[in-house]
Amino acid sequence: MDDQTPFGELTVRPPYDPELVPVEQALRELLPNLTAESLTARRQPDLNGEVAEQLVGFEQVDLTAGGAVRVEERQVPGPDGAPDITLLILSPVDDRGPKAGIYHIHGGGMVTGERRLGMHMYLPYVAEGHAVAVSVEYRLAPEHPDPAPVEDCYAGLVWTAKNAAELGIDPGRLLIAGESAGGGLAAGTALLARDRDFPALTHQILVCPMLDDRFETHSSRMLEGEGIWDRTSNLFGWTALLGERRGGPDVSPYAAPARATNLAGLPRTYIDAGSVESFRDEVLIYARRLSEAGVNVDLHMWGGGFHGFDMIAAHAAISRASTAVRDEFIRRALEH
């Protein structure tokens, strides 16, 4: 990786929400900057378990929801000429006919994470019989740089749409969701689905998404050595994905959706961010541009929130508020 950073002086950041301060301090000690040297350790399940044990709001999730959810994994065709991909499929045991489909893409900065990560957010809708959730195991950078991750995500989405009837999904009620890097990949996959005319998506749920590789915004330069995703980690993630192309003119909008020049025809969008996170400004800009392109957008910025605060510190009042707002949107989306 190139050690030259694309940013100069640290910019000013807002203060953290008081309830989040001790959590942010714990994160700072447990999760150092993501670099080539720390990547292997960050990918280890035992590290994730150690972090989970020390942070409020993290716990092991029973994906069966006490027996209400059927858990299945399928190997399905990947992109042309690429290996098969694994899909994690959660469906209600009490099957009441075709229901909405949630196609999920996990986070992890493009370089870590796996298909179960983040699925706790969508488990209640499956357990209640409102949805089938499908989560894709895409190839990770830097071993598999762009376009491998987004093409894997699109291939899994195509398989899900083509097999909707078997999965118990109403093909007219298919939405896409992702968090962090998964939110960026969800946005890129939605662009691919639009441009390749398949499949039709009703909504995209972009939770604190990773959208822009250029480091041109104020918020992309305001964090160093704090939070869960600072500018050094962000530089590593984007460079792992794009290599020497990062920040230059030859980056596809499917890899970095902030670069898309045409956002018309995309599905109704939920998008959010904390005010103290690297992705704040690119989220605000993307939401504005979606609106200008005629897309209905529900935008939420949470004052004092760091990256992923509501998933990491679920006990905090700001987290409960954020989760409730997102839950209300998803429930409406599933009824579409």
Image (cartoon, grey):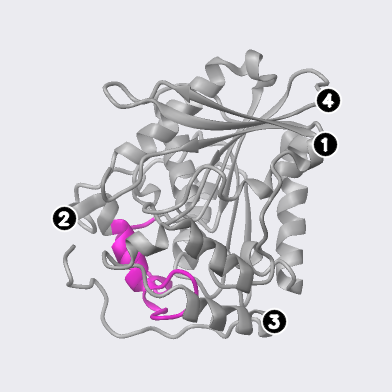
Q: Which badge, 2 or 1, comes first in the chain's sequence? A: 1
Under circle 4, the secondary element is loop
Q: Are marks 2 and 4 in contact (CB under 8 Å)?
A: no
Under circle 1, the secondary element is loop
The answer to whether residue 302 is visible is no
Locate the N terminus by quadrant: bottom left
The image shows residue 7, relative to residue 173, as above or below, that is: below
- Picture quadrant of residue 229: bottom left
Q: Nearer the viewer, mark 4 or mark 3?
A: 4
Residue 176 shows which numbered tag?
A: none
Q: CA distance from mark 4 to mark 3?
A: 39 Å
Q: Which badge, 1 or 3, comes first in the chain's sequence? A: 3
Category of crowding for the residue at label 4, using alpha-carbon neighbours closer than 10 angstroms: few (below 14), some (14–19), many (at least 20): few
Q: Which badge, 1 or 4, comes first in the chain's sequence? A: 4
Under circle 3, the secondary element is helix
Q: Nearer the viewer, mark 2 or mark 1?
A: 1
Q: Which badge, 3 or 2, comes first in the chain's sequence? A: 3
Category of crowding for the residue at label 2, using alpha-carbon neighbours closer than 10 angstroms: few (below 14), some (14–19), many (at least 20): few
Numbered marks: total: 4
Q: Which residue position is annotated with label 2?
A: 244
- Picture quadrant of residue 64: top right
The image shows residue 179, relative to residue 26, as above or below, that is: above
- Residue 201 lies, in percent from the top left, at 57, 30
Query: What residue range appears in magenta?
Result: 212-238
- Picture quadrant of residue 4: bottom left
Of the residues shown, which amino acid type is indicated by label 1? Glu
Residue 128 shows which numbered tag?
A: 1
